[in-house]
Image: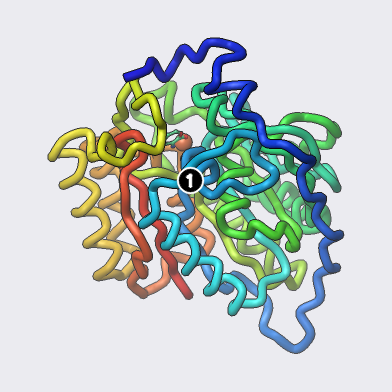
Amino acid sequence: MARVFQVPAGSSRSGARRAAGTPAVPAPAPAPASGEQKAGIVAGYLAPHPPHLVYAENPPQNEPRSTGGWEVLRWGYEELRRRLRAHRPDVLVVHAPHWITMVGHHVNCVPNPRGISVEPIFPHLFRYHYDFRTDVELAEAIVEEGDRAGLVTSALREDGVRVDYATIGALHLANPEWDLPVVSLSANNNPYYYSDASLAEMETLGAATRRAIERTGRRAVLLGSNSLSHLHWDTEPELPEDMSAERPFNHAQYAGDMELLQTIREGPTSRLKDAVPKHIEATSSETKAGSLTWLLAAMGWPDIAGDVLAYGTVIATGNAVVEWVP
Ligand code: 2X7
Ligand code: FE2
């Protein structure tokens, strides 16, 4: 087993595995135009972002090369992509836990973010060249609605600020063509500082997001990018995609994930108001960062069940791909 946190520079696990060629530059995104189709939130997805899933797909934008791995989760994402297309969205709105902001909730308002996104713990798996379009009008509307609701919000306007790997990972897995405009929201870090911090602000941010989508007349698909149980190994196999080493961290972590997924599958979503904090307590779930609560609050906690498209572990963390169509 190799140490996850120490990859020797220039080893076969870093620079030497770099992909040849330059990344594909996406075509300019089409201007939002819904025609006679109904505006609003047309679907929401729990869309986890472990860098391994992108690594395993070998897209041209990612430098490292793999021989595959984590297939069941990736098949779930294939189904997500089919369904997402069928919803014909104008825009993807993503909340992801690794754009961490210490003060308030930030919204990326840079029209054309581009650069290289690197996973700091797994740089041998994820060095991804991105170039995408932001729906600036919607992004600004979310900032305004958040402000109006009493949240501390901020519009990121500096070109060149590196986009985190969770935002890029979820967006790539949901739409590898990058042909839809994006709005990206940060995760405020309070829940990781204060043990009694609640997810109540995510309710407010979700409702503000919904109002902004309705006000601007967009058909939006939301991506809440969280893993579930979050204990993980601190070592990885010599070949990262060696699936004989991939399993849940322990039975309690797996059982906690299954309990949450059972509640999701039965519905209605309002049961998750209690189930999510309980799951966080039991499994150190990454939903603590608020992306799942934001997603469900934005959809108004609809009276429906979620459709679990896949579940699998990544370096022992639990990950599920789930669809809700309000
Ligand atoms: O960010 C992550 C994650 N959520 C799960 C597993 C491995 C790496 O990164
Ligand atoms: Fe993560």
Q: Position of residue 95 (x, y in %)?
A: 57, 47
Residue at the outermost left position: 251
Residue 44 seen in render: yes
Q: Residues within 10 Å of mark 1 (few under 14, many from 20)?
A: many
Q: Callout 1, which amino acid?
A: Leu
Q: Position of residue 215 (x, y in %)?
A: 74, 68
Image quadrant where one finds the N terminus: top left
Q: Position of residue 36 (x, y in %)?
A: 75, 89
> Relative to the observer, which residue lies in front, 169 or 134?
169
> Relative to the observer, which residue lies in front, 165 or 11?
11
In the picture of the structure, the residue carrying the numbered disc 1 is: 53
Q: Position of residue 111 (x, y in %)?
A: 85, 47
Residue at the outermost bottom position: 36
Left or right, 269 with reference to 14: left
Residue at 65% over, 60% down: 92
Residue at 25% over, 54% down: 260
